[in-house]
Image: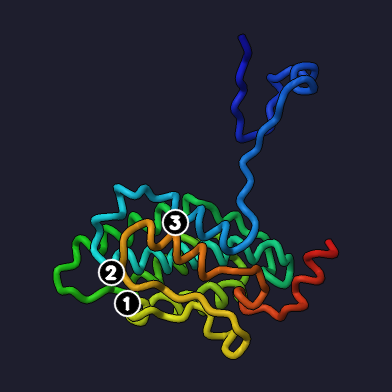
Amino acid sequence: MFRLFLSADPSNGVPIGILDRSIKLTNEPPAGLKANMKRAWSYFSKEEIEDKDAKIKSILFALCYFHSIVIERRRFGPKGWNMMYPFNMGDLRDSYLVMNRYMEQNTSGKVPFDDLRYIFGEIMYGGHVVDDLDRRLVNAYLENIMHYGIFDELELIPYAEGKNVSFKVPAPNNYDKYVEHIEVSLVSETPLYYGLHPNAEIGFRTN
């Protein structure tokens, strides 16, 4: 017989003696772009995504990449963001729900990328951002990611051209193929994924 305490906030209701003798578990975000991408993609169930329109799959994959990038840039401190922002899985979930609703209500066949970029960059993720330069960075990522090129195997890391670093939006496929693409394409971790100089990792490792 045992007691289980679940809390998202510090609590004075749990005796110190029990805490000292307890096993403590925390759920930390994974480290690295590959781990973040796998976590972001697997947040959505196979049953939920498998039968979606090919355009929705491609947009969701690009959105997972954007989410992973903004999350992982935080580990570089001031080189990543001017301030620490509480980006989380709720931002990804809500962005997907809004995008999915937009696509289902869209009868013209034209993807409203301008609307999606505004919602993601100014409301969902941008709602956390208070620094003007950080906001410009968020919007720059979205301008590079959220456009019709994602339906044609868009290169998501164009700023690392000639440096043997590449990660593309795969052609529409089944759910497991996207997971396989993440596993195979993201071989090693490098600051180049985020548009940062390789030396950015020196400060991160030192800290």
Q: Residue at x 56, y 67 (%)?
A: 69
Q: CA distance from mark 1 to mark 3?
A: 18 Å
- Relative horizontal placement of residue 46, taking residue 63 as reference (left or right): left
Q: Residue at x 62, y 59 (%)?
A: 85
Q: Nearer the viewer, residue 121 or 47?
A: 47
Judge whether 47 appears above or below 124 on screen: above
Q: Nearer the viewer, residue 135 or 31?
A: 31
Query: On the rendered image, what quadrant is the N terminus found in?
Result: top right
Q: CA distance from mark 3 to mark 2?
A: 16 Å
- Relative horizontal placement of residue 85, taking residue 205 as reference (left or right): left
| Cβ–Cβ under 8 Å for marks 3 and 2 | no
Q: Which residue is mark 2?
A: 55
Judge whether 100 appears above or below 157 on screen: above
Mark 1 or mark 3: name the one nearer the start of the chain: 3
Residue 65 lies, in percent from the top left, at 49, 66
| Cβ–Cβ under 8 Å for marks 1 and 2 | yes
- State the image quarter where residue 176 is shown: bottom left
* Amino acid type, label 2: Lys
Q: Which residue is mark 1?
A: 151
Residue 53 lies, in percent from the top left, at 23, 63
Disc 2, SS: helix
Q: Which residue is mark 3?
A: 41
* Amino acid type, label 3: Trp
Residue 13 lies, in percent from the top left, at 68, 19
Judge whether 35 appears above or below 193 on screen: above
Q: What's the mark number on residue 15?
A: none
Q: How many marks?
A: 3
Mark 1 or mark 2: name the one nearer the start of the chain: 2
Q: Residue at x 60, y 72 (%)?
A: 134
Q: Residue at x 45, y 80 (%)?
A: 143
Mark 3 or mark 2: name the one nearer the start of the chain: 3
